[in-house]
């Protein structure tokens, strides 16, 4: 998997939101939602991104698609510089990169029928295709995501959460994209329905050779679906590794704490819990040095010094960690 | 052990817009013993929150009502109490923690005011004494600089801190029973771990019995002594923690446990429970789960199952598979 072709190459991506204060709305600072993230996603793989709320994972995903304009850095999709694209070039590129949002109740227009929702991307990206062709392709994707044909004429409110998420997936699939960004696609769903949607997402990847960026705050879901996993904390990637390596041997103290915090549905499993003190600091004023050092059980004085902001280093093969003490812990 | 709370055959329903009436809770029985933790698990809409609101009698009279059943708490039937008597009981002997720490604290009053209100109300003490107790409670739930926090407003605290305040309020008059309705669902996992640890620790120290309502099997596994699994308004499986996790008997419990991706295991494809939960107005004639059940028998479609003993004493399943042969 690792030696594959790079589809998405992100270098030092920064997305800062200005903080405006006072009557004249003067800029007084920045919220560093994404601050210097570099990652590569290979063709045909699923890259999972985990982190707690507010760590910048959704902002990162949206900045990659330029749904939010990044402040700095570079994004290359299949060799093309996404940030340098004009709006018409970007439109052509977006045909190949699609998104499925978290909340299936908010991301489907309640006044459109399912057929209109699903074929809207075709109207925009392939104007002038004949009616029969349109209908045929809508039928095709409906079948692909496991919905009945008569669903096409219904409205979103007639469907349950799991079915709505299938409609969202159908809308993303109709353009035959290469890359789909899933932004917490199963967080709003119940357990018994969640596994149906997760299995569908996996089957589609196999049958259509898709590349995924999959975001979730739920480590067990990410572990289930991903090939490689990145862990984010406060706007930075702190650890990236193939999933097996990461889950068997987490090297960053934050990853270790995050993993031990997940409740396991088996009363006999004893977890050596690393309970972190405190809360995630504000991204407007992140701690100097390593951003995790204020909550880290292994922090030394060196971790907090301003020039010691750790970079991702390949500690073992394909296993990148941003921690100055990671090797010695 | 003495029974603290005993709920018998509880039915709660709601009025619908077209003048009808639907049952959200349909004959629920359970007991909670002194100092133990009972977990009520189930997916959204299965009636777990309505069950807890029924115990507290917090169902808005215009929206719905308890139609049948008995709720015995320390030898008294709560359903025969007047609203005034319930008011004296709520917050003093039974307390509740709600899911959203963001919306369950009043944004226009200080933490101190909201924390001292129930203490003064139920313990009839002076302002200074209430203040003293409030500071102690905040310290108990691990909030740094409690004196200063008393003067702050909810928006100045993070989600985890707010939930700590909620726990402090709920435990301030040393209730015998604490009902926690999805106390950590709105929180991040590392904060969830802190709060669960805190709840375990404080309820042990104060010997409070807890009803923990959650949809997360993982949380239940780490916290509870006994479990009630709910589906479509009924308890489908009820038993000790180890019995239910190691020998799940009801096909719904089995499916639920199998469809969770596990952090401690390798899994290729996930188990799926086909279909979805039936709507409240469209319950099947037989077992509510049978349209989704892979082991359904002809009788499941026709008749509702009773409660049968599953693996041993105290472990029951509401499923025809466990019906005694002669029936």
Image (cartoon, coloured by chain):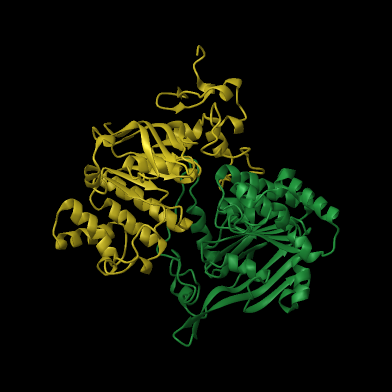
Chain colours: A green, B yellow
| Nearer to us in this view, A214 or A319 | A214
Report which quarter residue A229 is drawn in.
bottom right
Q: Is residue A212 left or right of residue A128?
A: left
The picture places residue B20, in percent across and down from the top left corner, at 47, 38
For residue A54, say whether it is visible.
yes
| Nearer to us in this view, B146 or B169 | B169
Q: Is residue A322 left or right of residue B131?
A: right
The picture places residue A11, in percent across and down from the top left corner, at 67, 74
| Nearer to us in this view, A301 or B96 | B96
For this orientation, the residue located farthest to the front is B19
Report which quarter residue A73 is drawn in.
bottom right
The picture places residue A241, in percent across and down from the top left corner, at 64, 60
Residue A132 to residue B227: above or below: below
For residue A78, say whether it is visible.
no
Residue B307 to residue B327: above or below: below
Residue A70 to residue B209: above or below: below
The picture places residue B213, in percent across and down from the top left corner, at 41, 44
Q: Is residue B198 left or right of residue A248?
A: left
Q: In this view, does A27 lie to the left or right of B297?
A: left
Image point 24% across, 35% down: which residue? B74
Image point 47% across, 77% down: which residue? A285
- Total labels: the figure holds 0
Image quarter where the N terminus of chain B lies is top left
């Amino acid at each position: 998997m690792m030696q594959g072709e790079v589809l998405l190459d992100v270098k030092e991506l920064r997305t800062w939101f200005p903080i405006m204060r006072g009557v004249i709305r003067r800029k007084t600072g920045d919220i560093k939602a994404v601050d210097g993230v570099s990652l590569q996603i290979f063709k045909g793989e699923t890259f999972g991104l985990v982190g707690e709320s507010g760590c910048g994972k959704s902002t990162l995903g949206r900045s990659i698609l330029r749904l939010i304009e990044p402040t700095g850095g570079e994004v290359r999709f299949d060799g093309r510089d996404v940030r340098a694209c004009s709006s018409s070039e970007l439109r052509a590129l977006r045909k190949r990169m699609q998104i499925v949002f978290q909340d299936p109740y908010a991301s489907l227009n309640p006044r459109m029928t399912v057929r209109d929702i699903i074929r809207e991307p075709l109207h925009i990206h392939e104007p002038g295709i004949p009616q029969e062709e349109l209908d045929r392709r809508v039928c095709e994707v409906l079948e692909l995501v496991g919905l009945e044909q008569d669903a096409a004429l219904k409205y979103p409110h007639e469907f349950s959460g799991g079915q709505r998420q299938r409609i969202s997936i159908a809308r993303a699939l109709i353009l035959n994209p290469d890359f789909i960004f899933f932004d917490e696609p199963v967080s709003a769903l119940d357990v018994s329905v969640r596994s149906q949607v997760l299995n569908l997402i996996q089957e589609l990847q196999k049958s259509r050779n898709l590349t995924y960026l999959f975001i979730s705050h739920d480590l067990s879901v990410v572990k289930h679906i991903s090939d490689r996993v990145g862990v984010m904390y406060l706007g930075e990637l702190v650890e990236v590794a193939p999933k097996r390596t990461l889950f068997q041997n987490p090297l960053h103290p934050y990853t270790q704490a995050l993993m031990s915090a997940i409740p396991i549905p088996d009363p006999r499993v004893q977890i050596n819990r690393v309970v972190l003190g405190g809360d995630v600091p504000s991204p407007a004023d992140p701690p100097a040095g390593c951003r995790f050092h204020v909550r880290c059980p292994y922090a030394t004085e060196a971790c907090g010094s301003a020039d010691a902001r750790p970079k991702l280093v390949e500690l073992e093969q394909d296993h990148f960690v941003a921690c100055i003490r990671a090797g010695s812990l | 052990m003495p029974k603290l709370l005993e709920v018998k055959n509880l039915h709660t329903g709601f009025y619908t817009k077209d003048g009808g009436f639907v049952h959200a809770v349909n004959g629920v029985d359970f007991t909670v013993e002194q100092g133990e933790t009972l977990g009520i698990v189930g997916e959204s809409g299965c009636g777990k929150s309505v069950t807890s609101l029924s115990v507290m009698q917090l169902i808005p009279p215009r929206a719905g009502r308890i139609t049948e059943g008995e709720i015995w708490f320390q030898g008294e039937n709560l359903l025969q109490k007047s609203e005034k008597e319930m008011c004296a009981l709520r917050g003093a002997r039974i307390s509740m923690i709600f899911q959203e720490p963001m919306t369950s604290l009043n944004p226009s009053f200080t933490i101190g005011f909201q924390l001292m209100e129930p203490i003064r109300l139920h313990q009839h003490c002076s302002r200074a004494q209430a203040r003293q107790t409030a500071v102690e409670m905040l310290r108990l739930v691990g909030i740094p600089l409690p004196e200063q926090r008393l003067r702050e407003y909810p928006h100045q605290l993070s989600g985890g801190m707010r939930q700590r305040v909620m726990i402090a309020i709920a435990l301030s008059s040393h209730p015998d029973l604490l009902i926690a309705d999805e106390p950590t669902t709105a929180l991040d996992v590392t904060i969830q771990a802190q709060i669960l640890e805190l709840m375990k620790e404080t309820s042990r120290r104060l010997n409070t019995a807890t009803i923990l309502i959650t949809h997360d099997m993982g949380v239940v596994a780490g916290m509870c002594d006994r479990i009630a699994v709910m589906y479509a308004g009924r308890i489908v499986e009820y038993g000790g923690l180890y019995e239910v996790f190691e020998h799940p008997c009801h096909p719904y419990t089995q499916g639920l446990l199998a469809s969770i991706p596990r952090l401690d295991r390798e899994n290729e494809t996930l188990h799926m429970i086909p279909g979805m939960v039936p709507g409240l107005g469209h319950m099947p004639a037989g077992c509510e789960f049978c349209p989704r059940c892979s082991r359904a028998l002809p009788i499941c479609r026709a008749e509702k199952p009773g409660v049968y003993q599953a693996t041993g004493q105290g472990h029951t399943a509401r499923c025809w598979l466990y019906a005694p042969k002669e029936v």
